[in-house]
Image: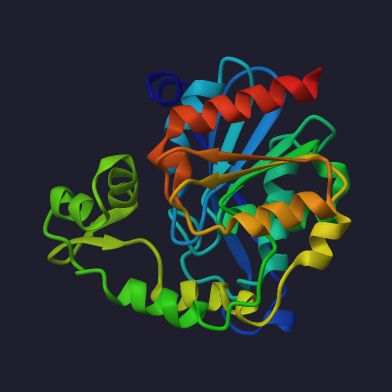
Amino acid sequence: MGAASTRASTVTVTVTDAEEAYGPGSGPVRLFCTDHGGDGPPLLLLHGLAGHCSEWEALAALFVATHRVIAFDARGGGASTRRPGDVTRAAHVRDVLAVARRFGLAGKDTVLVGQSMGGLTALLTAAAHPEVCRALVLIEAGPAGPAPELPEQIGRWLDSWPVPFPDVEAAEAFFGGGPAGRAWAAGLVPGPGGLRPRVDRDVMVATVQENAHRDYWDAWDRVRCPALVLRGENGTMKPDEADRMRDRHPATRIAVIPGAGHDAHLDNTPAVYEEMAHYLRDLRQ
């Protein structure tokens, strides 16, 4: 992590949601961004639901020697606006475009990298705005759906958190320990009685409402850039979803990350790095 930590700087990007379209509570949304620096083709990193951009630090540290690396907290997460008025997929896509413009990333060399819901945002961005990216890396993310049970599942999961956590060690243990447990615990902040999440439960449930009612295969069919799909060996992405993605878009490479679950980028960072680095080298050639 040393290279990323010493070179990283933070910037806030502001996106304005139209209040007349999205109702009270809309308006400026602040997006907390981390610029890890680095030289070479840009990587824009998008975390999953209830996550935060710091969970990319280990991977960013490996890439800064060969790439410009930027990550940001999605609306509703991390240090970005906690209760935005608009949490649709379209709003998340607009945020990607705003961050890309702010850092001068939108262009033929940029690779969008997303895990879980961040991967879906990357997919939708590439489908609607092919001019902003060279390729996609989707980690445990794809267009399958609908998932009518998802909002209730997310609500139950967040309700199960024993908030406040008395200390970091208790939080890490609750989240399963290891790199993933440490990353989830790092997303908490001090509050009354202990450590508390930086996300709002109802905002997170609202964020997945669209996924309950539809799939995104139509968007996948509009993606024209090549893609790398990474599944965790023990993850939640089904093999047939990845296979169907390749069948419909032959410029898709699939790899399985050994020993990893849904948070593959945390569970086995070296393997994710090796798959990505090999893929990115092939792209340049």
47 lies above or below 111: below
Residue 260 is left or right of residue 26, and the answer is left
Quarter of the rendering containing residue 207? bottom right
Which residue is found at the position 38% from the left and 20% from the top? 2
Quarter of the rendering containing residue 25? bottom right
Q: Position of residue 264 (x, y in %)?
A: 46, 44
Residue 120 in view here: no
Which residue is found at the position 43% from the left and 77% from the top? 153
Q: Position of residue 121 (x, y in %)?
A: 67, 57
Total labels drawn: 0
Residue in front for this viewpoint, 144 or 74: 144
Query: Which quarter of the rendering shows the C terminus?
Result: top right
Q: Position of residue 133 (x, y in %)?
A: 79, 40
Residue 136 is left or right of residue 223, and the answer is left
Residue in front for this viewpoint, 136 or 251: 251
Instruction: Give the colouring mode of the picture.
Output: rainbow
263 lies above or below 4: below
Residue in front for this viewpoint, 195 or 147: 147
Which residue is found at the position 52% from the left and 33% from the top? 272
Residue 281 is left or right of residue 150, and the answer is right
246 lies above or below 155: above
Query: Which quarter of the rendering shows the N terminus?
Result: top left
Q: Position of residue 258 (x, y in %)?
A: 45, 37
Residue 86 in view here: yes
Residue 266 is left or right of residue 129, and the answer is left
